Image: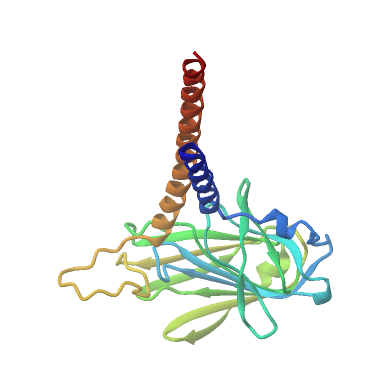
Amino acid sequence: MKSTKFFSGLAAALLLLAGISGCSEDESKTRKIKEAPENLTIGGMRVAIWPEYDDRSVLAIYDGRFENATSFPLKTSFLLPKGAIINDACSLSVGGQHFCQLYKTINRGEYDEVRLLLPYPNFYLSFHALPIDVENKERSFSYKIKASHAVKSMLIDIQQPLRSNAFSISPADNGNNALSRAQSKQSQKKGFNHFSYTLKDIPKGQENTFKISYVKSDPNPSVDIKFSTMDGPKTWGSPYETQKNAKTIVYILFGTGALGIAVVIAGVVLYRRKRRPEKSA
């Protein structure tokens, strides 16, 4: 009786560990959902690129709407910068409600492919990527956008960090004349300078690169998301690194935990086998 309870507990622990790793699709629920067709097109899409907004990295937001709404739900994917830490991967209902989805990340070399189920044609992804060296006052990076679907209209919204100057954006040509001719439109929202570009009729697989540079003396993000009543100077950490490290720790715990439970089970089985001859004697 005790051994039955023991093995039941082990089974429950294994199920719990399996649940911890839950950044993948539940195949039993999504098996019948079809894959997105090759010609699936995004009608309108916004790409927000906000360096050092709330972290020492780039906050990016991809949101938009697919055409052919009647074909949903579908399983599809998006290409994100390598090593992106995802905050939200959601599908939006007609009423604007966010339905966050489980997702699977696949290494595609220079990019990470994020696969997910979209119940509705509207999508919303936010993530942090491209850690920025804040020890250097002269900062620069290249942000590449690779279209995982054809896009009829894409709005690029680039936000200048607060307390920065000499802000410069250079859209790379990459053989895309429309991008090299795109004109920047400047506006101000909530104290931030925004620069926008509108691109039309982007084919699937096309890559557009924006080279961004600026000068910033302090290491702090534009928005202070850490509220504290403690006296003394604040120490800025990096949510990007924290999430990345936490993700690694979860995988290590899952691997070592599952291995440890397997060793315990094997030990109990061997122990019981050794005791059997003694009982029959």
Res 181 quadrant in image: bottom right
Residue 238 coordinates in the image, percent (x, y): 36, 60
Task: Point out residue 1 in the picture as x, y percentages from the top left corner.
Answer: 49, 39
Residue nearest the observer in this picture, 81 or 93: 93
Inspect this view and state whether residue 148 appears: no
Q: Residue furthest front?
A: 281
Along the horizontal axis of the image, is 175 left or right of 274?
A: right
User: In the depicted view, which residue is nearer to us: 27 or 205?
Assistant: 27
Vertical placement of residue 2 versus 226, above or below: above
Residue 241, position in %: x, y? 40, 55
Q: Residue furthest top?
A: 281
Horizontal arrangement in the rendering, residue 47 relative to residue 232 (left or right): right
Residue 210 in view: yes
Front residue of 50/88: it is 88
**Residue drawn at (49%, 47%) of the image:** 13
Residue 119: quadrant of the picture: bottom right
Residue 202, horizontal then vertical, whole percent:
75, 67
Tag count in the figure? 0
Protein image colouring: rainbow
Seen at 32% across and 57% down, the residue is: 135
Above-or-below relation of 12 to 29? above
Residue ID at (48%, 86%) = 188
| Relative to 216, 129 lies left or right | right
